[in-house]
Amino acid sequence: MAAGGAAVYLFEERRLKRHGVGLLLRRGVPLETLDRFSQRCITLGFPVFTVAMITGAIWVARLSDTFFTPQYAVATGAWLIYAALLVARITGGWRGRKAALMTIAGFATALTVLALYVARGVKGA
């Protein structure tokens, strides 16, 4: 949901810079509202993602001899992107375009994890 809000933020920002008219509403969605929405989604989702990373590590360690898997490495990268985004928002005051781009980068990294699992499943079948 955060990535969706970030994508709409970037779309609306671009529309405003070009002085265009929104597709759904003539005035569009306020950028501040979209930015706050994405921030809240990440703030609420990050602890859940952290718990998922910890339980995933425990699960992988129990099922195999190795702790390291490509999927877990990429998932750690996604976690680090979201952690850096939260720190940048809190300490660096990141808002708007930078935060939206980093949110989408984190989501793309998380989708890469899913793609790796799907590819592994297809290869193993």
Image: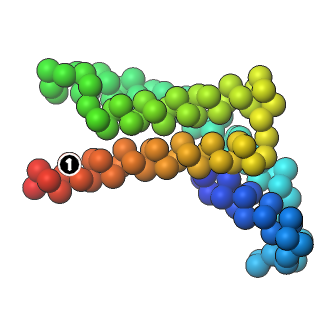
Task: Locate the C terminus by quadrant.
Answer: bottom left
Depth check: give the residue in front, 47 or 95: 95
**Image point 71% across, 42% down: which residue?**
99
Q: Is residue 46 visible?
A: no
**Image coords of residue 6 (percent x, y):** 68, 53
Q: In the picture provided, is 101 more to the left or to the right than 69? A: right
**Image coords of residue 119 (percent x, y):** 24, 53
**Image point 58% across, 34% down: which residue?**
82
**Image point 29% across, 22% down: which residue?**
58
> Which amino acid, mark 1?
Arg
Res 106 → quadrant: top right
Q: Is residue 73 visible?
A: yes
Q: In the picture provided, is 35 more to the left or to the right than 27? A: left
**Image coords of residue 112 (percent x, y):** 39, 48
* In the rendered image, the vertical position of residue 99 relative to residue 87, given as above or below: below
**Image coords of residue 117 (percent x, y):** 27, 47
Q: Residues within 10 Å of mark 1 (few under 14, many from 20)?
A: few
Depth check: give the residue in front, 121 or 96: 96
* In the rendered image, the vertical position of residue 46 relative to residue 22, given as above or below: above
**Image point 86% across, 66% down: which residue?**
16
* In the rendered image, the vertical position of residue 107 relative to residue 57, given as above or below: below
For this orientation, the residue located farthest to the front is 18
Res 87 → quadrant: top right
Which element type, helix, strand or loop, lies under badge 1? Answer: helix
Q: In the picture provided, is 81 more to the left or to the right than 17? A: left
Look at mark 1 in the image and give the residue it sits on.
120
